[in-house]
Image (spheres, rainbow, N blue to C red):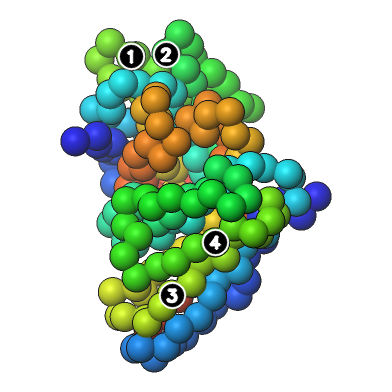
Amino acid sequence: KNQVEQSPQSLIILEGKNCTLQCNYTVSPFSNLRWYKQDTGRGPVSLTIMTFSENTKSNGRYTATLDADTKQSSLHITASQLSDSASYICVVSASGTASKLTFGTGTRLQVTL
Amino acid sequence: NAGVTQTPKFQVLKTGQSMTLQCAQDMNHEYMSWYRQDPGMGLRLIHYSVGAGITDQGEVPNGYNVSRSTTEDFPLRLLSAAPSQTSVYFCASSYWGHVSYNEQFFGPGTRLTVL
């Protein structure tokens, strides 16, 4: 069964600090991996999409890494801001069919003063 | 562009009532889908459509119906609401070709409570 596991479940950091969120997956055959940011009460918004051949992808202060061999990904947030407080969802896509997106349960990040 | 819009934003139903959640997109996306999001669980696919007149079931389709008469609209109907359908519902759209390669755009969600 395809699964996506994220850790930690929640995280509190001080503004200005860096943090790294983890995603492990067992999805086959792998197509791509996505990170979404979901603000409270809003829909998810895409941060990055990474295919098998991409190891690192950045979007401003967000940097995602992918190790397709170990089936792990991380999302690194640099110099956190209060606006980074949100849930971050890892989504893995399997190739070959339209509906095969497997969603993680998310990491809830709170950035405080 | 407004992107993906959903109405209503909040809804309270009694058990057994029916209702339709509306979803529209103005990006000319072929692929549209409905998800539900429950605490402690990842988003789960309810139904999806790859174009007008074409729909298919996702992971949790029971108790829901969909239709796709136009490219822009993809309503989700609850036939007889049950407390287990209390959830936050998201509509999403993307270009077709293959959804797994295309970025999905999500609507703001509808929070549904069934008493």
Between A62 and A42, the residue placed more toward the observer is A42
Which residue, given by chain and number where applicable, does mark 1 sit on? A68
What is the chain identity of the residue bearing mark 1? Answer: A
Residue type at tag 2 = Phe
Q: Is residue A39 above or below residue B105?
A: below
Query: Which is more foreground, mark 2 or mark 3?
Result: 3
CA gap, disc 4 to disc 1?
38 Å
Query: Which is more foreground, mark 3 or mark 4?
Result: 4
CA gap, disc 1 to disc 3?
40 Å
Which residue, given by chain and number where applicable, does mark 4 sit on? B67
CA gap, disc 2 to disc 3?
38 Å
Q: Which comes before the other along the chain, label 3 or label 4?
A: 4
- Is label 3 in a helix, a strand or a loop? strand
Residue type at tag 4 = Ser
Check contact, mark 2 vs mark 1: CB within 8 A. Answer: yes
Q: Residues within 10 Å of mark 3 (few under 14, many from 20)?
A: some
Residue A2: x and y in percent read: 24, 34
Residue type at tag 3 = Leu
Which residue, given by chain and number where applicable, does mark 3 sit on? B78
Which residue, given by chain and number where applicable, does mark 2 sit on? A52
Residue B65: x and y in percent read: 44, 66
Residue type at tag 1 = Ala
Residue at the spot 60% in from the left edge and 45% down from the top edge: B51
